[in-house]
Structures are given as C-alpha cells and as structure tokens.
Image (cartoon, grey):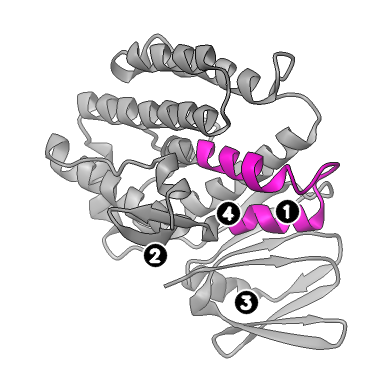
Amino acid sequence: MTWRNIMVKDGDYLRLKLDNLQIEKAGQKYIVPLSDIATVTLEGKILTLTTRLLAKFAQYNIAVIVCDNKYVPCGVYMGFGQYHRTAKRNLEQISWDEVLRKEAWTRIISQKMINQKDVLIACNLEKERINKMEELIANIQFADITNREGHCAKVYFNSLYGQDFTREQDCLQNDAMNYGYTIIRAYMARLVTSLGLIPTLGVFHRNEFNSFNLVDDLMEPFRPLMDWYIVDKLLPKYKKYLSWEMRCDLINFMNQSYSHKGRKTTIDIVMLDYVNSFIKLMQYGRDKELLAITLEGMRGVQ
C-alpha cells in the first residue's frame, strides 16, 4: 500500500538503488522503498535524476510532480498501460450511457456544494450565507444545467475570504488553494490511469485541450476538504507567503485522517475507494452508489 508523498528540493541527486529511491544531499543518503511511494514532488533549479529511476517510477505507478520557478506544480509524469484490462475498461467508459453520465455529474457536483456549505458551517459563518448555499443546493437540476455550482462558488469564496475576494487575486489563500488542488489533481490522475480509465474522457468536462477532463470531474468533492484543511490548519500557522514548510504541509493533505463507515483511513486511500465506486457506477448503473466524500469524514476522526 503506497502512502509516502516525497518532496525533493534544490541540490539533490536521485538514483535507483535496487527497488528503492536513493536521495543524496549534502553528503547524506536517504533510502525509501519504491513500493511505499505514491508521489514525488520536485522543485528547484538544480536537481538530477536518472532515466532508470524514471522507468521504475512508471512501473511502480509513482506520479512525479514538477514545479516551476515559483514553486507551483506545473507538470506530472506518470506511467501508462499499468492496468491489466485497460482495453476492456476503455470500451466500458466510451459506451457509458449519456443519461447515467449526467446523473453521475449531478451526484458529484451536489456533493461538492454540500461540502462547501459544511465548510462555512464549520467556520461559524453567517446563517444567511449558509441558507443561501442550502437554497442553491436544493435547486440543482439534472446535470446542473442552470449552473448552481457557479453561483455557489461565488457565495462560498466571498463568505470565506470577504466580498472583494476573487480566485484571480495574488494572495496566500489563492496560492495555497492552487498548490493544494494541483496535488489532489496529480494524485487523482495517478489513480485514474492506474485503474484503466481514459483521463481525457470526462463526465462533465469536455475541453479538447485538457488531458485530464475525468480527473477534474472526480476531484471536485475533494476541493472543499482541501479548503477546510487550509483554513483550519495552515492559514493560522503561515501568514505571509507559500513557504517550503507550507508546501510540505499541503502535500501532507493526502495523509490526513478520514473516517468512513466507522473505519479510520486516510485521504489518499478514500480517493482510491471513491474512484473504484465510480467504476462500479459506470459498470452496473444506478444500482451502485458513488462513495459520498464528506467534510464530516475528515473532521469526525477521533
């Protein structure tokens, strides 16, 4: 079971040591079994790794996230063809009933909006704003054809960060969310490809220039969980800029505890369960439920 999310900074040398990742820095060597690793995030201008190691990363289904000169994740490297029945699963996905596809999107986006509302409740924000969110959720139509999700997002972010806040502002809140969402996206892309799904063939997202339409669909309910993690754990701790320590904490979101049906697990494991529930919905139709991803699952861990 993979569970480590490795962060590597300037000046390191990464090489393959048997079936382990060996990290060399300042004369010290650190060994991590490849079978333990889910993602490796690389940042900085001076960093060396071998092609043999990249090949092993692909074979072990380890996602390698590359950051730009502003430390923002800008690319992801993954293996392909890891699932043993990829062609069969691809055909199932391509032939999926359009009505069921729209029903799945209604479930996904409704859960995201419910989680956003629950974030506002957890933050003890004004009742009138929570009531507005509840009204928008109650009025979702099939496949959200009236874009209640877009209206909900405006109320949500203005409630969290003020009436003048926009997602385009240059501020710590946006930097943290952008970084955090990219980490979720990379991890979700790893799961989608490893389970034989076509990442470009989305449920709702259909952008011809987007390689990860399905990934962007499936990650939606997890965004508010990242928002809560940032508001509750990180913004009280980090005040000025997206520091190295804050970036490490954002990556550590994947290891946060999550409670599901009385079982204590972690975000990365519940993401796997969630994608598997999506596959069952795709295969067997309305008889199968999409796993509900809730803020309570994250906050209710004892």
Structural crowding at the residue carrying mark 4, measured as other residues with C-alpha within 10 Å and reported as few (<14), some (14–19) or many (≥20) = many
Residue closer to the observer: 238 or 22: 238
Residue 137: image location, x then y, percent? 38, 18
> Disc 4 to disc 2, how far (Cα)?
26 Å
Looking at this view, is 32 or 16 the one in front? Answer: 32
Q: Is residue 10 above or below residue 284?
A: below
Label 1 residue SS: helix
**Residue at position x 45%, y 14% from top?**
131
Residue picked out by circle 4: 253
What's the CA distance linking mark 3 and mark 1?
A: 24 Å
Residue bounds of the magenta highlight = 223-252
What is the magenta segment's predominant secondary structure?
A: helix
Q: Amino acid at mark 3?
A: Leu
Q: Is there CB contact under 8 Å for labels 4 and 1?
A: no
Find the distance from the CA under tag 4 to the CA under tag 1: 10 Å
Residue at 47% from the left image edge and 70% from the top image edge: 2
**Label whose residue precedes the other's in the sequence (2 or 3):** 3
In the image, what residue occupies the spot 78% across and 37% down? 172
Badge 2 crowding class, 10 Å Cα cut-off, few under 14, some 14 to 19, many 20 or more, is: some
Cβ–Cβ under 8 Å for marks 4 and 2: no
User: Distance between the Cα atoms at labels 2 and 3?
Assistant: 17 Å
Q: Which residue is identified by label 3? A: 53
Q: Which residue is mark 1?
A: 247
Residue 206 visible in the snapshot: no
The disc, 4 or 1, on the residue closer to the chain's N-terminal end is 1
